Image: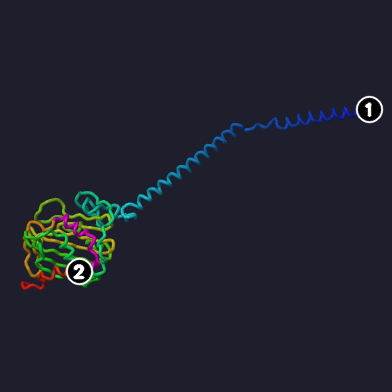
């Protein structure tokens, strides 16, 4: 009996201790208030932030893809490399242009970008000569004309040797003079001569018309100036094309509407316009075969072409 009473007393005490412990625990947390609203708001902010970051990562990836695409478009435009800034701002010299001097020209369209045609089908291993220049020109002149006088106008003076020819040409409609010049030019500034800004803009003789000088860049990076020069005497003027290649070579082709004081002769107007139309004269200058070296066959053909033509000095000089 005593043992059972002791056991019951112990159990009663255990229950009492449990109740007191539970009461103490409830009392200890009774004043604690969980910031449910703040937790919820913070959780929302964190969620939205993660969403924004995710959207930004997606947008950044898309922009990177677009940027790569744009870079590819620039890289493959023209000849596979971006054009210099000055070239990107200037158009073809056949159009409204802004050359290195900031001059402007007549209105037309921009030349399309296209790979340059191969200069020759034979090895170009022979230095260009004055006779070879006459041959390259003759191949592109209208049929029926002939050279009646010839002078080798090459020069070794100055920093770079110059290959040149001076020709008297007769196409049956009046004799005219033609000048050809090819040399190395260290840079564009030394080759442009100031562009149209410093050159004549209008011939003082016929034909009348709008501005007749324009300059700018071609699709291959060459710089070109096309103009009708001022008349030396009334009605005697010329068509001139100046072409500077990125390789560092300068070509100048000039034709006149008469004869100038070369060969000891007098200036004289022989026709209303130079023998070759200006746009055709420009196309001749843009022929890629004007190079410091040409095939030997071109030199040989030039020698044969010029051999029967009277050479300077002439009896009248």
On the question of residue 230 being in view, the answer is: no
- Residue 20 placed where, x, y %? 79, 29
Query: Is residue 61 covered in magenta?
Result: no
Foreground pick, 309 / 97:
309
Label 2: element kind: helix
Location of the N terminus by quadrant is top right
Disc 1 target residue? 2
What residue is shown at x 78% (from left), y 31% (from top)?
Answer: 21
Q: Which residues are magenta?
A: 277-298
Q: Residue at x 59, y 31 (%)?
A: 37
Q: Which residue is mark 2?
A: 299
Find numbered disc 1 in the image and state the secondary structure of the residue it sits on: helix
The structure residue drawn at horizontal position 45% and vertical position 45%, both measured from the top left corner, is 61
Left-right relation of 252 to 262: right
Q: Is residue 132 visible?
A: yes
Count of numbered labels shown in the rendering: 2
Q: CA distance from mark 2 to mark 1?
A: 141 Å
Q: Nearer the viewer, mark 2 or mark 1?
A: 2
Residue 128: quadrant of the picture: bottom left
Tell whether label 1 touches label 2 (CB within 8 Å): no
């Amino acid at each position: 009996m005593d043992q059972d009473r002791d056991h019951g007393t112990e159990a009663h005490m255990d229950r009492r201790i449990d109740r007191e412990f539970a009461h103490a625990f409830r009392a200890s947390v009774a004043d604690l208030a969980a910031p449910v609203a703040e937790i919820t708001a913070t959780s929302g902010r964190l969620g939205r932030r993660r969403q924004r970051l995710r959207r930004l990562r997606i947008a950044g990836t898309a922009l990177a893809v677009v940027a790569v695409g744009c870079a590819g478009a620039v890289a493959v435009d023209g000849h596979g490399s971006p054009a210099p800034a000055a070239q990107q701002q200037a158009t073809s010299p056949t159009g409204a242009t802004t050359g290195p001097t900031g001059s402007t020209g007549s209105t037309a369209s921009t030349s399309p970008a296209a790979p340059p045609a191969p200069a020759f089908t034979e090895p170009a291993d022979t230095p260009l000569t004055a006779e070879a220049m006459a041959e390259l020109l003759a191949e592109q002149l209208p049929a029926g004309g002939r050279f009646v006088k010839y002078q080798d106008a090459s020069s070794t003076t100055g920093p770079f040797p110059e290959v040149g020819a001076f020709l008297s040409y007769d196409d049956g409609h009046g004799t005219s003079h033609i000048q050809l010049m090819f040399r190395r030019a260290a840079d564009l500034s030394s080759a442009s001569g100031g562009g149209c800004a410093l050159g004549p803009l209008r011939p003082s003789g016929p034909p009348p018309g709008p501005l007749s000088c324009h300059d700018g860049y071609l699709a291959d990076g060459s710089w070109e100036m096309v103009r009708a020069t001022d008349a030396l005497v009334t009605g005697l003027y010329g068509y001139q094309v100046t072409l500077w290649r990125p390789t560092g070579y300068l070509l100048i082709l000039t034709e006149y509407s008469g004869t100038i004081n070369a060969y000891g002769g007098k200036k004289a107007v022989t026709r209303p316009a130079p023998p070759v139309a200006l746009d055709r004269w420009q196309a001749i200058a843009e022929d890629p075969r004007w190079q410091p070296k040409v095939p030997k066959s071109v030199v040989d053909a030039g020698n044969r072409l010029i051999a029967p033509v009277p050479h300077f000095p002439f009896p009248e000089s």
